[in-house]
Amino acid sequence: MINDGLEKYRIYRRIICIDLKSFYASVECADLGLDPFKTPLVVADKSRGDGSICLAVSPYLRNKGVPGRLRIFELPKGENIIFCKPRMKRYLEASAKVVSIFLRYVSQDDIYIYSVDESFLDFTDYKALYPESNLKLAKRISDDIYKETRLYCSCGIGPNMLLAKLAMDIEAKKIKAQIAEWTYEDVEKKLYPVTPLSKMWGIGRRYEVTLNKMGYRKVGDIAKADPTIFKKRYGVLGEELWYHTHGIDMSLIQDKKKFKPLSKSYGVGQVMFEDYNKETSPEIILEMADDLSSRLRQTKKKTKTIHLSIGYNQTYGGGFSRQMKLKEPINLGKDIQKACLELFDKYYNGEPIRRFQISVSGLVDDSGLQLSLFEDKEKKSKEEKLLDTMDEIKKKYGKNSIRRASTELEYSTAKKRNQEVGGHHE
C-alpha cells in the first residue's frame, strides 16, 4: 500500500453508517402499503404547478435513472406517477422511530444523527454483546428497521466514520445486499479509481471543478500528490482532503456530540413558484430577514456578516451570491433587509428570480454591545421589547397570530410558510 507511514493516523473502530433509501418517498409507499421498488411515486406538491420541486422519488424511479431532485415537468412521461404532498411531520415521526430502534442496540452517546435519514453507530465497545460479524450485525439492524417501519436502508461499515460512509455511498447502494464493508486495505482498490471526484463524500461540484483544473480527475490522483499543494491552497481543509483520500479520518462520534462551534451561522431560503422582480423581491427579503432576526434575538446574538444568494429562472440560468461585512453587528429584520437590498441593488441584473437565500454569520453575543452614536438608545430598546413581545405571542398562538400588514400582499409567502414544517405541509 502507498504511504504505509500513515498507519499512525489510522483508528480502528466498529462504525456502521445507515441510510434510509429514498426516505420521503419510501415513507409514503409504506403508509400506502406499496412496494417502493415497484411503484412510480414522487413526493411533490402538484398543486403548485409543474415547476414544483420533487423532494424525493421512489427507488423504482431511481432505478430508471430519474434523479432524486428535479422539477415535476422534468419527470419521465408515460409513467403512471403517484404524487404525494410532502408531510414533514410524518417524516420526522418515521425518523424518530428508526432512531428508537438504534437505541436498543447502542447508547445515545454512540449514535451520531447526520441527517433525518442517515446516522452513524459506533459498536466498538459492544463486542461482547454483538460477537457476530459486522455484516451480520448490519443485516440484523436493517431487518429490524424493515420489520417495524417497512423502510429499506443501505449500510456501510468501516474502521472510521469516513470509510463507513464511503462504503455505503460508493458500494452498498449499488449492490443487491445493500451492505458493504471497507477496511484501510480496500482504499487503493476501491477509492482511488473513483471519478468524478464529486462522488466522494466531502467534495462538492465547485470543489471538483477547481481540482479538475489542477489536473486531478480521480481520487487516487490526489492521494498520490504532494499534500503540501493542498495545504498551501486550501489550508487545513486541503490537508484534510488529502488524508481523506487515504481513508484517514480520526474524528469520533463521541467527540462530535460534544463539539460546540465557536461561531454559528443561521440561514433561510425558499424556491418560488412564480417569477419575482425588483418590485416584489424586497418584501420576500424582509419576510426572510424577520425570520433570521427572530432566531438571532432568541439566541441573544447579533450578526456581523450578511450573505445574499439569488437564483434566476431556469430559462435564463445563473444568479449571484455575495456577502457584506457590517461596521456594527445587527439583529433587527429591517437592518438585515437593508444590508440585503444593498447587495441586491448592486448585483441584480433584472432577470426573473426563482430562488432567495439569506444567511447571517460572524455571530457575537448581544450583551454589552455599544450602540451607534447616531442611534436613539431608548427608541431601539422599545423596538426590541416590541419584537420580543411579538415573539412570545407567536410562540403561544402560532406564527400567523401576529404579522406585518404587508404579508397580506398577493406575492407575499410568509403567511403560507408559517403553516408549514420545513417549507412544506405538515
Image: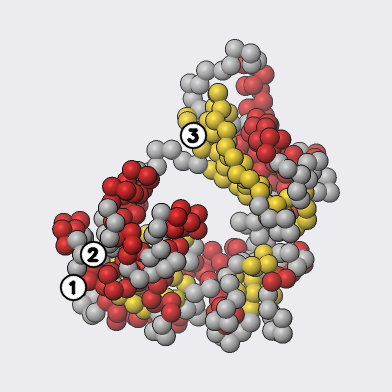
Q: Residue at x 58, y 16 (%)?
A: 372
> Callout 3: 10 Å neighbours few (<14), some, many (20+)?
many
Q: Which residue is mark 1?
A: 128
Q: Position of residue 78 (x, y in %)?
A: 72, 85
Q: Residue at x 66, y 48 (%)?
A: 319
Q: How many marks?
A: 3
Q: CA distance from mark 1 to mark 2?
A: 15 Å
Residue found at the very far top of the displayed protein? 373
In which quadrant of the rendered image does the C terminus lie? Answer: bottom right
The one of 42 and 27 positioned closer to us in this rendering: 42
> Callout 2: 10 Å neighbours few (<14), some, many (20+)?
some
Q: Mark number for residue 363? A: 3
Q: Which residue is mark 2?
A: 13
Compared with 391, 163 (above or below) is below
User: Mark 1, mark 3: which one is toward the viewer?
Assistant: 3
Element marked by disc 1:
loop
Q: Earlier in the sequence, mark 1 or mark 2?
A: 2
Q: Amino acid at mark 1?
A: Ala
Q: Residue at x 34, y 49 (%)?
A: 230
Q: Amino acid at mark 3?
A: Leu
Quarter occupied by residue 344: top right
Residue 249, can we see it?
Answer: no
Element marked by disc 2:
loop
Q: CA distance from mark 3 to mark 2?
A: 36 Å
Q: Position of residue 184 (x, y in %)?
A: 23, 68
Compared with 292, 210 (above or below) is below
> Callout 1: 10 Å neighbours few (<14), some, many (20+)?
few
Q: Amino acid at mark 2?
A: Arg
Q: Position of residue 71 (x, y in %)?
A: 68, 67
Element marked by disc 3:
loop
